[in-house]
Amino acid sequence: MRYVQEFRDPVAAKGVLAAIARVADEIGVTKEDPVHIMEICGGHTHAIFRYGLDKLVHEGVEFIHGPGCPVCVLPMSRVDECVELAERPEVIFTTFGDAMRVPGTRKSLMQAKADGADIRMVYSPLDALELARRNPEREVVFFGLGFETTTPSTALSIQQAAREGLTNFTVFCNHITVPPPIRALLSDPHMVLDGFVGPGHVSMVIGVHPYDFIAEEFGKPLVVSGFEPLDLLQSVLMVIEQIRDGRAEIENQYARVVPEYGNPVSLAAIEDVYEPRPSFEWRGLGEIDESGLRICDRYSAFDAEAKFGIGYGAAAGRAVVEEPEGCACGLVMTGRAKPTECPQFGRGCTPEMPLGALMVSSEGACAAYWQYGGARAVEAAE
Amino acid sequence: MNMTSRVSRLRDERVTLAHGGGGKAMCDLIEEVFTDVFDPPGMEDQARLTDAALREAGTRLAFTTDSFVVTPVEFPGGDIGKIAVCGTVNDLVVGGAVPLWLSASFIIEEGCEIALLRRIVGSMAREAKAAGVRIVTGDTKVVGRGSADQVFVTTSGIGVIPAGRDMRAESVEPGDIAIVNGVLGDHGAAILAARGDLALSTEIESDCQSLGHLMEAVLKAAPGVKASRDATRGGLASALNEIAEAADVTVEIDETALPLREEVKGMCEILGLDPLYLANEGTLVLFVPPDQTEATLEAMRSTEAGRGAVAVGRARDKGPVPVTMRTAFGGERIVDMLVGEQLPRIC
Amino acid sequence: MCLGIPGQIVEITDTERQLAMADVSGVKREVSLAPVSDRPLADLVDEWVLIHVGFAMAVIDADEAAETLEALRGLGEAQETLEQIAEGERAFMEDRA
Ligand code: SF4
C-alpha cells in the first residue's frame, strides 16, 4: 500500500532507533530517570503497541499516553443521552462502531440495541445522510463524535443536508478540540512531561500553529507526527533532539499530509456550523473551558439537542456523573500513573466490562495496554 | 435428481406458515426443495447408517453439530448452505475424522423466497458431493415473520477416525511448526463488504470450502501432524490461542509470513480491524514436527484448498502469554483472544 | 485518534455533491472530496488523498513524502555502515588476537 508500506521499513527503523539511542545517551536519560514524551493521540498509542515501539526504543524514553481518544473521554452523561435518543421510536440512531461499547450509567449503545433501539453502525456521516434520504418518515440522528479531524466531516454533512433541505437529519454534537486539554495538562502542577508527539490528522485540519503556545508559554517541544511506525520514531527523535539542544519548537514530521495552516475548506466549514461551548466535560479530566463545540443557531434545525430538547450539563438539569470509584484514569492521563498501577486494571476494569474511560476504545491507553500486554500486563501489575 | 421430469406441485413463490403446518403444502416443500435434491434420493427421518469403515478395529466415531446464521445469506463465494456443509465437514476434518454423514435442519422465516431455498439447498448438495459426504436426514420448521432472518441452518456430522490417528491440541510441543493452508480473513472481509452498510466494494470472495481432501493428503504425506483447528470465528488468533492454551506452549508467529490479500489489508486499514481476528470458513492451521514441514506443505499445495499453504510460526516453550507475533517492523506484540466482536472504528 | 488512510481517487461520481470513488488496495468506497475542493475536482483524479470517515481530508504531497523517506533511509544506511565498520573492527581485532 503506497504511503504506508514504505513507512514500515525495518531497515530504516534500525537507523532511527540507533539515532534515538545516541541522543538519549547524550542527554543522559535512563530507565530510572527517563524523558517523558506524551503522544497526545490515541492512534499513536495504538501504533506504539501494535508495532511494539515502546520496547524497541532506548529505555530512557518513556511514552505517556495522552487523552486523544474521543470515545474514551466522552462523559457518561452524554452516553446516557445517546441511549435516550436512540430509544425514541421514531429515531434511527447512527454511530461509529467505536462508540457502541462505551458504558453509560444505565447502559451502552450496544445494550440499547439489544433492548430494541434502532441503532446502526456507519462508517461515515455520509452514510447517515443516505439513511435520512431513504427513510423520510424516520428521524435519523448522527452521533457526531471526534476531534478536529472528524469535526469537518460532520459540518460538511450538515451543510449538505441544508442544501438538500433534509428535515429528518440531525447531529448529536459531541465534537471536541485538542489544544484546550493540552493546556489543562500543562497547567497541572504535577505534570511531568518533557515533550509531545502531536496528532497528525487533527493537524491536517488545523495546521501546526494552534500548538504555538506549548512552545512559547510552556517551553515544551512538540512534533506533529504521522501514524506509521517510522513516522513515530522519527518524531520521537526530533523531540529528543530538541530537548538535547535546549530548544522548544513546534515541528512538523508529517509534512506529506499536514499543511502549515491546515485545510481551509474544513476550517471554513467548522467556522460556519459550530460555536464553542463555554466548557465541556472530559471523562477523567473534568470540565475544560472552550473544549467542546455545539451547532450554532443558524443550523439549529440539524441540532439534535435543539430538536429533542437535550441541553448540555447544567442546562440539561443533570449533575456531573461521578467517575467510578478507584478509577485512576485522571492520573494515567496526566502521566502520573501507568495503567497497570491502577487498582482496577484487569480486575474491575477490562475491555469486556470497562470501568474507566481509558479502557473503553482500543485507542485508550489502558485498553491498548490490555490488548497488547494481556496477561503479561496484569502479571506486571501484580 | 428427478425434479425436472415431474410437474412441480409447489406453486408458491414464498414460504408461508402453511408450509410448516404438517399437511400437503409441507410435504410438497420438503420433497421438491429438499429431499429430491440431496443425493442419494430420499432423506429420511432416521438415517440407517452402515459403513464398513466402522467395523475396523480401533476406529472411532466423531460427531459434531453447528448452527449457521449469516447476513446476508448469499455472499460472494458462497451462501449459508455451502457454509453449513463446509463448517461441519471441517469440524470433523480438523479432528482427524473422515466425514461421512450429515443432517441438515432448516428454520425458515415466513416469506422466505422458495427460489432462494432452492439455491441454498442446491449449493449444499454440490458441496456435499464435492466433500464426499451424504446428507442423510433433515428437518424443516417455518416460523413467523421476524422470528428468524430468512433461513437458519443447523448441520450435524458423523465421521470416523481411522485407527491410529490421534490429533489433539495437547500433543503440540515446542519446536512444532504452524502451517496455514491459504490466505486469511477473506470470509470475514467478504461478509463485511456484502452487508453493504459500510458501502465498501471489493472483489474479495469468501474462502468457504471443505478441507477433507486437503487433510487426507496431508496425513498421507506427513502422518506426524499433531493437531489442527479451523480458524473460523475469531480468526487465526483465536485458533492459535486455543491450541497454545491446551498444549501449554507459546506460539510465536511471524507477521511477514502471514498470507493476506492486499484487499483484505486495505479493508482492515480502512475500518481499523485486525486481519488476525477476521473469520475464515475454509482455512485451518495445523502443527507438524519440524522434519515434516516440507512434506506437509507439499501435500497441501497439491490440493485445491491448499495452494497458498505456508508456515506462519512455531511453538516454543511456554512464556507469559500464549501467542506472540514478531511484527514486520521487528517488534513483538501479543496476540490475545478477541474481546467481544471487532467493531469498525474511526479512531 | 482519527484513523486516516491513503487512497487513490479513481473517478468523480457526483460532481454536484462532490463525491468520488476512491481505491484503497483494491477496496472501493465513495468518498466526499469537499475538504479538498479548493482545487478543481477533475484535477483530483489519480491523486492520493488521506481518507477519514469517508472524506478526503488532504491531498498527499508526494515530494514531501519522498523527502521524509529519504531522511529516514539515510539514517538506516548510516546505521548499516556503522555496523559494518564495527563488524570489520571486531574481525580485525580477532585476527590479531
Ligand atoms: S484501568 Fe480502567 S479505571 Fe483504571 S485507569 Fe485504566 S481505564 Fe481507568
Image: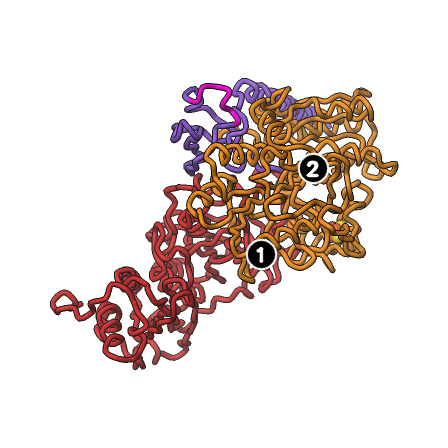
Chain colours: A orange, B red, C purple
Residue B220 visible at all: no
Measuring from the top left, give residue A321's x and y in whole percent.
Answer: 76, 52
Other-residue count near label 2 (Cα within 10 Å), few / some / many at <14 / 14–19 / ≥20: many
Residue B326 sits in quarter? top right
* Labels 1 and 2 share a subunit: yes
A249 to B224, vertically: above or below: above
Residue A292 is marked as 2
Measuring from the top left, give residue C12's x and y in whole percent.
Answer: 39, 28
User: Mark 1 falls on what kind of element?
Assistant: helix
User: Mark 2 falls on what kind of element?
Assistant: loop
**Ligand 1 within 8 Å, label 1 CB:** no
C91 relative to B141 in the view: left or right: right
The amino acid marked with disc number 2 is Gly
Residue numbers of the magenta segment: C35-41
The amino acid marked with disc number 1 is Met
Residue C40 on the magenta span? yes
| Residue ID for mark 1 | A110
